[in-house]
Image (cartoon, rainbow, N blue to C red):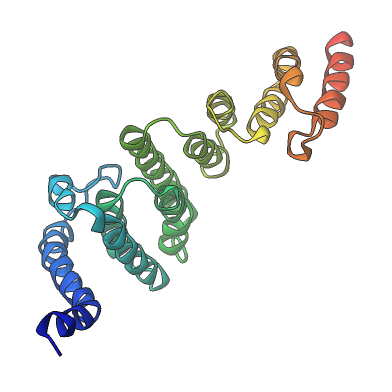
Amino acid sequence: MSSSVVNSRLWPWVFPPVVLLATLSVLRPLEARLLPITASPAATVAGSGDTFALLGGLRTVVAGGLWLRTNLAWERQDEAETTTLLRLTVAADERPLTFWLNGARMMAYDFPAWRSADAPAAVGERTRREQAQAALSFLERGIQVRGPSADIVVEMANIRFRALRDREGAARLFRQAAELPGAPYYAARIHGELLRELGRPAEALAWLRHIQPGLPENDPAAQRAVVQERIKGLEQEVAGK
């Protein structure tokens, strides 16, 4: 048997360990440098972009491994390690939306829950607001490196609404999301509903009239009939004032 044949058969078994060792040699120094960092998770790893770029097509593999480790740290409720690994993950590969959306949810909802389990109410409130802002900054960074994304803006709107209880800010972001390509239909509906809850029924009516012609009748997600009913209700509400 020729050596070329033997090598070709051995290569599929040798290649993965080689890749793993190379990856670890890149990641370990980065992790050691990042673990003491307590700055806002908004930024990705400073100076790591060029390092990860050297991996070329392996960036996806490296990011997937880092994301797995992020989730393991999350299961242990280790906030510091989760944050570090999350930042490394998006530095390795900024493209997958799941890294940004689920990472922001960890920051906005899970971290405050871990910290506030036995804390006074005032401390829990402060932590909740701080982490919501950190999650928003993280998502803003996602937009900077990935480009405009309706999904990311919807997530920001949800954090504004749920974590910060900021209806005004949430309404603004839902409209911003609704005006981006690929936006879910519900973003526009929620914007209109929040305007009504904010005591601005005339604006809500004008908005729903604006979006109604573009809603397809044969797509259940568009809920065109629901929007038409809301328009009728708002017309009565506005006329009654």
Task: Name the residue at 72% across, 12% down.
Answer: 206
Which quadrant of the figure has residue 42?
top left
Question: Which residue is more in the foreground, 96 or 156?
Answer: 96
Where's residue 97, x and y in %? 44, 47
Which quadrant of the figure has residue 13?
bottom left
Outermost residue, front side:
1
Q: In which quarter of the image is the N terminus?
A: bottom left
Q: In this view, does 29 lie to the left or right of 81?
A: left
Question: Which residue is more in the foreground, 100 or 57?
Answer: 57
Q: Is residue 81 left or right of residue 191?
A: left
Question: Which residue is more in the foreground, 10 or 121?
Answer: 10
In this figure, what is the number of numbered marks? 0
Image: 140 above or below 110: above
Where's residue 23, x and y in %? 17, 66
Where's residue 238, x and y in %? 83, 12
Which quadrant of the figure has residue 192?
top right
Task: Name the residue at 81% across, 34% down.
Answer: 218
Outermost residue, bottom side:
1
Q: In this view, does 187 lie to the left or right of 224?
A: left
Q: In which quarter of the image is the C terminus?
A: top right
Task: Name the residue at 39% across, 40% down.
Answer: 139
Where's residue 76, x and y in %? 38, 73
Image: 93 above or below 154: below
Question: Which residue is more in the foreground, 224 or 190?
Answer: 224
Image: 213 above or below 81: above
Q: In this view, does 208 lie to the left or right of 11?
A: right
